[in-house]
Image (cartoon, rainbow, N blue to C red):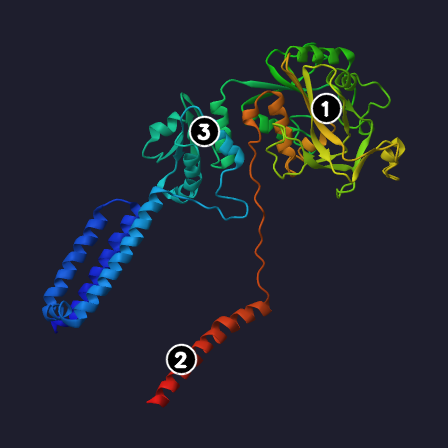
């Protein structure tokens, strides 16, 4: 067999060896045995090609072919140099653009705010076996976002629990794919590697010490342990995930609010608090406490015509009056649910962005000029103009004949929520004319959960923990094409396009043939 015929195959194999070496190095960023063997094989095969056909090599490197070849070589070399420079600058200055609709590869604003406030280094350990490398690689972009946005304050490392069982046992790793977040001497295991869980663990580790929030009971309030639609278990879980201690408090049994209470929440009482209980709340606030009062309209409670000492106290001392009405909002698909049309610039609401909130069976508030110079009162949420406060008790009870009566009903926009602060006693009060918005049934609706947790955070003076809430993903569905669409796709891709190419080729061939 003529040796010169083997030369092209040797050069092709040498080119294949160079390609393997380049791809392997780009993927794994290390000069390992695979790269070295591929490069050595490429050199040996190229040398073999030269020895097999030396005459062809002499012709290639002399004459016109050499001149044209050298020009092409220099042009290729220049292109490779440009690509190399661009690659270097891209590696030195990495930029990412998230074009997904739900910003799936961008940290939520709450997580970015949290990372800006990290004072001590945080480390994330990911425990993944080699068999679970797919999940590990899918998690890497999220952790890389944490590292970049924290300015190096957060780092991450992947550990094989089989190769390092001592470290896995040390941090209580019980299954493949768990994360452990470390800060100083403290650590917390994360079972599910999501942004919500990772940010929550960082919050709990960087805010040591228990923060206690009490929910008043004994008057038909929302049950923080109930998972029913009317319960408040979602609020409780959200608070506990942010390192709050959450407990119930019965002032009929314990006449004073505990000293460790950062805030007291009165969530939708259906019966009036007693004067003694209201006095205990007043004494607590005078000592710098915080109150979150979520008060339903009288028409949906069991108060009847009885006096409401808590409502009287809020109006007398804090200049916030709970109106005796029921909000009707024609902008809502449910007319008896007030829709938030506007937010004030306040720590509770200024990060609500464009999230709407809605309040089923709510009452309006009226804010008066504070009687004390040390007191500030601020509205938080307003309804739209196409709403009013219905005062006709019979229409409210029957649900019939709800209409705006000028001079009797309150025209919108109306205040739905208000916050007050005393700068001398350091006490804070937030009043909302509804408690349904924070129930399990409504918690994940629009921005309701954010508003509920933000309110308690601000009252408890924990603004740095505001709104660590999960991002909701838009559900997407794949609709299979119809039979007609399948036929059209078949016609275009397999008949029209190839047929057009063949026809054009035939016309070109026929034109050249006629000229010849």
Rendered position, 275 above or below 246: above
Front-most of residues 388 and 180: 388
User: Which type of secondary structure does the marked residue at label 3 adopt?
Assistant: strand
Front-most of residues 388 and 471: 388
Please provide percent x and percent y for residue 13: 21, 62
Q: Which mark is residue 189?
A: 3
Instruction: Note whether residue 391 is visible.
Output: yes
* Earlier residue among tags 3 and 1: 3
Task: Residue at 26%, 60% (x, y): give it.
Answer: 76
Q: Is residue 128 left or right of residue 267?
A: left
* Earlier residue among tags 3 and 2: 3
**Looking at the image, do the residues carrying marks 3 and 1 touch, with CB atoms under 8 Å apart?**
no
Which residue position is annotated with label 2? 505
Q: Is residue 226 left or right of residue 68?
A: right
Between the residue at mark 3 and the residue at mark 1, the CA separation in whole angstroms equals: 34 Å
Between the residue at mark 3 and the residue at mark 2, the CA separation in whole angstroms equals: 66 Å
Which residue position is annotated with label 1? 221
Q: Which mark is residue 122?
A: none
Please provide percent x and percent y for residue 27: 31, 48
Front-most of residues 240 and 110: 110
User: Which type of secondary structure does the marked residue at label 2 adopt?
Assistant: helix
Q: Mark 1 against mark 2, which lies toward the viewer?
A: 2
Please provide percent x and percent y for residue 302: 82, 24
Q: Mark 3 against mark 2, which lies toward the viewer?
A: 2
Task: Residue at 49%, 41% (x, y): give it.
Answer: 106
- Disc 1 packing (10 Å; few <14; some 14–19; many ≥20): many
* Earlier residue among tags 1 and 2: 1
């Amino acid at each position: 067999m003529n040796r010169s015929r083997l030369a092209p195959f040797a050069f092709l194999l040498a080119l294949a060896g160079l390609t393997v070496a380049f791809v392997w190095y780009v993927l794994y960023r290390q000069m390992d045995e695979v790269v070295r063997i591929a490069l050595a094989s490429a050199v040996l095969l190229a040398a073999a090609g030269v020895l097999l056909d030396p005459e062809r090599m002499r012709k290639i490197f002399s004459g016109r072919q050499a001149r044209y070849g050298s020009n092409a070589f220099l042009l290729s070399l220049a292109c490779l140099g440009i690509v190399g420079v661009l690659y270097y600058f891209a590696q030195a200055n990495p930029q990412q653009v998230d074009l997904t609709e739900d910003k799936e590869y961008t940290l939520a604003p709450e997580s970015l705010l949290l990372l800006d406030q990290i004072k001590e280094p945080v480390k994330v350990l990911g425990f993944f076996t080699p068999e679970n490398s797919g999940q590990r690689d899918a998690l890497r972009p999220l952790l890389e976002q944490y590292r970049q946005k924290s300015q190096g304050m957060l780092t991450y490392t992947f550990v094989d629990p089989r190769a390092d069982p001592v470290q896995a046992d040390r941090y209580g790793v019980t299954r493949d794919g768990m994360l452990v977040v470390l800060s100083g001497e403290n650590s917390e295991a994360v079972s599910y590697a999501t942004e919500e869980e990772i940010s929550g663990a960082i919050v709990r580790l960087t805010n040591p010490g228990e923060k206690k929030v009490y929910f008043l009971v004994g008057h038909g309030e929302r049950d923080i342990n109930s998972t029913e639609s009317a319960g408040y278990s979602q609020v409780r879980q959200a608070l506990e995930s942010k390192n709050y201690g959450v407990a119930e408090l019965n002032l009929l049994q314990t006449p004073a609010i505990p000293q460790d209470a950062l805030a007291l929440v009165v969530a939708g009482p259906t019966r009036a608090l007693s004067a003694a209980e209201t006095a205990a709340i007043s004494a607590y606030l005078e000592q710098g406490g915080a109150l979150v009062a979520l008060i339903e309209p009288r028409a949906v409670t069991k108060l009847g015509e009885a006096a409401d000492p808590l409502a009287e106290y809020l109006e007398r001392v804090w200049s916030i009056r709970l109106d005796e009405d029921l909000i009707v909002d024609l902008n809502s698909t449910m007319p008896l649910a007030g829709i938030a049309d506007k937010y004030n610039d306040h720590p509770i609401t200024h990060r609500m962005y464009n999230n709407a909130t809605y309040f089923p069976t709510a009452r309006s508030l009226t804010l008066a000029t504070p009687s004390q110079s040390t007191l500030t009162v601020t509205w938080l949420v307003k309804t739209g103009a196409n709403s009013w406060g219905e005062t006709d008790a019979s229409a409210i009870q029957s649900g019939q004949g709800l209409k705006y009566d000028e001079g009797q009903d309150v025209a919108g926009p109306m205040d739905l929520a208000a916050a007050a602060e005393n700068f001398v006693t350091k006490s804070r009060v937030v009043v909302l004319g509804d408690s349904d918005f924070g129930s399990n049934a409504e918690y994940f609706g629009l921005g309701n959960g954010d508003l509920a947790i933000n309110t308690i955070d601000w009252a408890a003076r924990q603004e740095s923990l505001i709104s660590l809430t999960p991002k909701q993903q838009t559900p997407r569905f794949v609709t299979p094409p119809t039979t007609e669409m399948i036929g059209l796709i078949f016609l275009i891709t397999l008949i029209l396009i190839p047929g057009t190419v063949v026809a054009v080729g035939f016309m070109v061939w026929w034109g050249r043939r006629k000229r010849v």
